[in-house]
Amino acid sequence: MLSGTETSGGCLNGTVAASRNLVDQGIAQRHIQVGQSGKTVSPKLYLALGIHGSMQHLAGLRGAASIISVNTSPHAPICSLSDMVVQGDACEFIEKLMDRMIRNPRKNT
């Protein structure tokens, strides 16, 4: 899934970040970790894909202007901080987002 997020991040002129869980599993590198033991970020939009939202992770994104979370659980802690919650699978969401962006490239900027 991380490769799909990197592609969509590039299409949206964004940067990919990761939770400590992904770093600990070796899926993501530590330098992109967000949270108390990682970075604090302040993007215009933080798209949280499958992020549960531990207190440590949430502490790293307090500067985000808007948060959209995509999660199978509407009760995940990240949802209480989100401006918009999409209840669903993050992998399916990113596939559909990429498909839409490929079909409508002029609307991506």
Image: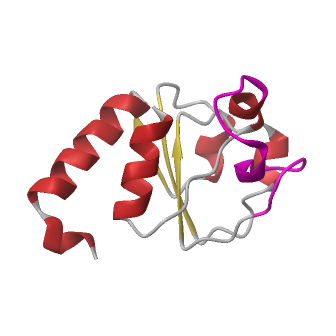
The image shows residue 18, relative to residue 65, as above or below, that is above
Spot the residue most to the left: 103
Q: Residue at x 71, y 65 (%)?
A: 41
Look at the image and name its color scheme.
secondary structure
- In the image, is residue 72 part of the stretch drawn in magenta? no
In the image: residue 109, left or right of residue 39: left
Instruction: Report which quarter residue 43 is drawn in.
Output: bottom right
Question: Can residue 65 be seen here?
Answer: yes
Q: How far from the left and from the top, in percent, is residue 80?
A: 63, 46
Please identify the dominant SS of the magenta region. Answer: loop
In the image: residue 8, left or right of residue 33: left
In the image: residue 31, left or right of residue 46: right
Q: Nearer the viewer, residue 30 or 62?
A: 30
Q: Residue at x 77, y 45 (%)?
A: 57
How many numbered circles does the render carry?
A: 0
Q: How far from the left and from the top, in percent, is residue 14?
A: 48, 65
Q: Residue at x 44, y 39 (%)?
A: 3
Quadrant of the image for the N terminus?
top left
The image shows residue 4, relative to residue 106, as above or below, that is above
Magenta segment: 24-40
Quadrant of the image for the C terminus?
bottom left
Question: Can residue 85 be seen here?
Answer: no
Q: Nearer the viewer, residue 87 or 48?
A: 48
Q: Residue at x 16, y 55 (%)?
A: 102
Q: How far from the left and from the top, in percent, is residue 6?
A: 46, 49
In the image: residue 94, left or right of residue 21: left
- In the image, is residue 33 part of the stretch drawn in magenta? yes
Q: How far from the left and from the top, in percent, is residue 76?
A: 62, 32
